[in-house]
Image (spheres, rainbow, N blue to C red):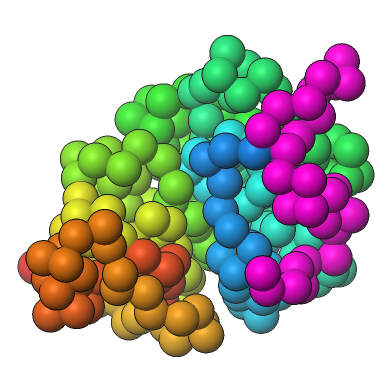
């Protein structure tokens, strides 16, 4: 297992135990989270780009949130994170928010407990401008493309958008849209390219199409539509 490079004791405890703890003290198994490699890459990118405002789609237990917020804190500026997750209360028991509070990041963080198709247009109507986004929501093509569509409207030139679970065919299809219908350049963030799948046919297809399960990040070169 790779070593966690994110300076966050709560994240260290979560990955070591593979569990999370509710406010009541009850333990729950860690699920639906990004792995250590992806957390490290996310932290380093936010550290390097020094964004003022970050938006993440999907929060769950707050693993990605903690990586982003640790980087914003270490950047020493007034960076903030907006998390969009309609199920933070009823599915995730507000554990993601609890982790953010435990880590001392509450002032840098806000939660929009709405569906992405409600929250993102609301942010756009407010003329929200962002420099960084991380898409880890519902992994169908329509939802992933919707997330990117609105993120692209708000993302400043030279901003970065990242995608989780890129090995999912629907997510990869949305990424192909990004590269063919907008002016973005993929970044090499040092993550290994993993093409293995449960079937030999899918593995071969991944090798041919370049479909890797690792997170992928893209820098916006300019505001452009075909």
Above or below residue 40? Residue 126 is: above
Residue at point 57%, 38% (across, down): 31
Q: Is residue 145 left or right of residue 217?
A: left
User: Toward the viewer: 187 or 182?
Assistant: 187
Residue 118 location, x and y as percent? 38, 26
132 in magenta = no
User: Toward the viewer: 197 or 22?
Assistant: 197
Residue 140 location, x and y as percent? 24, 40
User: Toward the viewer: 59 or 166?
Assistant: 166
Residue 170 appears anywhere in the view: yes
Residue at point 38%, 79% (across, down): 193
Q: Is residue 31 left or right of residue 93?
A: left
Q: Which residues are magenta?
A: 1-29
Residue 108 location, x and y as percent? 78, 46
The count of marks equals: 0
Residue at point 20%, 50% (across, down): 170
Residue 225 location, x and y as percent? 16, 66
Quadrant assignment for the C terminus? bottom left
User: Toward the viewer: 66 or 38?
Assistant: 38
> Which picture quadrant has residue 162?
bottom left
Quadrant assignment for the N terminus? bottom right
Q: Is residue 6 left or right of residue 87?
A: right
Q: Is residue 192 left or right of residue 175?
A: right
> Which picture quadrant has residue 179?
bottom left
Residue 161 appears anywhere in the view: no
Residue at point 67%, 48% (across, down): 63
13 in magenta = yes
């Amino acid at each position: 297992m790779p070593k966690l490079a994110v300076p966050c004791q709560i994240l260290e405890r979560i990955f070591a135990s593979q569990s999370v703890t509710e406010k009541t003290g009850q333990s729950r198994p860690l699920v639906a989270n990004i792995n250590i490699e992806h957390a490290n890459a996310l932290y380093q990118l936010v550290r390097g780009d020094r964004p003022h405002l970050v938006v993440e789609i999907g929060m769950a237990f707050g693993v990605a949130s903690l990586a982003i917020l640790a980087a914003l804190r270490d950047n020493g500026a007034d960076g903030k994170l907006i998390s969009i997750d309609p199920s933070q209360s009823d599915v995730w028991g507000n554990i993601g928010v609890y982790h953010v509070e435990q880590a001392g990041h509450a002032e840098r963080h806000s939660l929009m407990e709405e569906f992405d198709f409600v929250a993102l247009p609301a942010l756009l109507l407010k003329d929200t401008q962002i420099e960084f986004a991380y898409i880890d929501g519902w992994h169908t093509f329509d939802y992933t493309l919707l997330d990117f569509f609105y993120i692209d409207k708000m993302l400043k030139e030279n901003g970065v958008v990242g995608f989780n679970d890129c090995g999912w065919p629907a997510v990869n299809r949305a990424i192909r849209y990004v590269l063919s219908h907008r002016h973005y350049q993929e970044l090499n963030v040092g993550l290994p390219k993993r093409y293995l799948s449960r079937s030999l046919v899918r593995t071969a297809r991944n090798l041919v199409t370049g479909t890797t399960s690792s997170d992928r990040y893209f820098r916006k070169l300019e505001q452009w539509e075909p």
